[in-house]
Amino acid sequence: MKVRVTITLKAGVLDPQGKAIEGALRGLGFAGIDGARQGKIVDLALAETDPDKARATVADMCEKLLANTVIENYDIAVLG
């Protein structure tokens, strides 16, 4: 089973990489940029066949390793 985890900084957490991206886009002439935030995507291939069990396992992985839950949120998408 394939699972995608999207990890983003929580609202209110300073995102210097996002600010750098925002500035670079403006410098390249892209107008109308109101903000940019950067995150991470982790794609996992699991032997599990039950989507609910896969989601629970990946949530445990996020809590223990993949995400810093003090400053980051994560979203789990079971892709099949």
Image (cartoon, grey):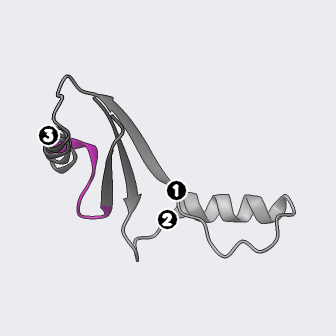
Residue type at mark 1 is: Gln
Q: Earlier in the sequence, mark 3 or mark 2?
A: 2
Q: CA distance from mark 3 to mark 1?
A: 25 Å
User: Residue 40: where, in percent of width, then height?
Assistant: 44, 47
Q: Earlier in the sequence, mark 3 or mark 1?
A: 1
Mark 1 surroundings: few (<14), some (14-19) or many (≥20) residues within 10 A: some
Q: Secondary structure at mark 2?
A: loop
Q: Determine the residue positioned at 30% across, 64% down.
A: 71
Q: In this picture, which residue range is highlighted in magenta? A: 64-72
Locate residue 61 relative to residue 1 in the image: left or right. left
Residue 61 vertical placement versus 74 (above, below): above
Residue type at mark 2 is: Asp
User: Where is mark 2, residue-wise?
Assistant: 15
Q: CA distance from mark 3 to mark 2?
A: 28 Å
User: Where is mark 3, residue-wise?
Assistant: 57
Residue type at mark 3 is: Thr
Q: Determine the residue positioned at 23% across, 26% down.
A: 46
User: Where is mark 1, residue-wise?
Assistant: 38
Q: Secondary structure at mark 1?
A: loop
Q: CA distance from mark 2 to mark 1?
A: 7 Å
Q: Quick check: is 66 in the magenta stretch?
A: yes
Report which quarter residue 54 is drawn in.
top left
- Proximity of marks 3 and 2: CB atoms separated by less than 8 Å: no
Viewport quadrant of the N terminus: top left
